[in-house]
Amino acid sequence: MAPTRAEAIAFVEAHTTLARPPLVPEVELYTATEVTPLWQVTQGWLDDTGLEPPYWAFAWAGGQALARFILDHPETVRGKSVLDFACGGGVVGIAAHHAGAARVVAVDTDPLAVVAASLNARANGATLATERRDLLGDAAIEQEVVLAGDVFFDARMARRVEPWLRALATRGVTVRVGDPGRAYVPGDFVPLARFEVPVPPDLEGSAWRSAVVLRPPEEAPAGARSATIGR
Ligand SMILES: C[S@@+](CC[C@H](N)C(=O)[O-])C[C@H]1O[C@@H](n2cnc3c(N)ncnc32)[C@H](O)[C@@H]1O
């Protein structure tokens, strides 16, 4: 059975500490300091509740790169409505808030991620609306900007997320992806920036990841965008 919100909050707070991700020190996140113990401690509880492993307990290299990019290029989101898709702990959405987004919605399918993202938002004085939702395939989203940190992590997810992001870009939505060199990232997405990100070796198998911020090639030039975004 899914945990109550109070149980989820207690779980996040019990197994993480506030820490600053190396590439985005402006932000503090409830973070697991060691990977393996959290995976082991949570295994039984996660099995009982049917939840995913605690992806929300780390700022993934793709998410950190995208958050860094947004803070360095606030014009990407300033004054706009923004979706942090597959938000995990919400590092990207919090960065968008800090960069001046008009409104940020953070969505994830994992109920614990949604709770972690709202706790993280509160810790950073950021306003984030959080929703547990699977938006893949929904072309009628209302946001002007979609940010997606580390979403090409497996073949099944990539098969769903790639056409969705391309379709949004075709409709005039600004799409930015942060990717740490996953095998399933589309080869024709256009790189905009690259960052070297320190990562936990027991999570990623190395101490650094080279992460790229990309956009779909379908994105129309700024002047050519439709005035009916999301329709
Ligand atoms: C590798 S984590 C990245 C989290 C965050 N964006 C970051 O970069 O730190 C991938 C996230 O995708 C979420 N996820 C998987 N399938 C999803 C879907 N269909 N819709 C929304 N989120 C999804 C997982 O729950 C997880 O939080």
Image (cartoon, grey):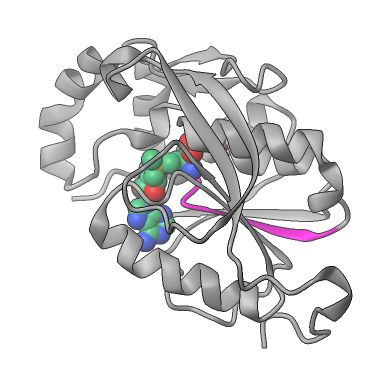
User: Magenta span has 91?
Assistant: no
**Quadrant housing residue 189:** bottom right
Judge from the rendering whether residue 136 lies leftward or rightward of residue 51; answer left or right: right
**Quadrant housing residue 217:** bottom right
Which residues lie in the magenta part? 80-90
Can residue 77 be seen in this snapshot? no
Judge from the rendering whether residue 47 lies leftward or rightward of residue 176; answer left or right: left
Above or below residue 41? Residue 85 is below
Can residue 52 be seen in this snapshot? yes
Q: Residue at x 43, y 59 (%)?
A: 186
Q: Position of residue 138 (x, y in %)?
A: 49, 78
Q: Position of residue 7 (x, y in %)?
A: 34, 34
User: Magenta span has 84?
Assistant: yes
Specify the farthest residue to the front. Answer: 188
Q: Residue at x 51, y 33 (%)?
A: 211
**Numbered disc total:** 0
Q: Position of residue 111 (x, y in %)?
A: 37, 48
Q: Nearer the viewer, residue 230 or 196?
A: 196
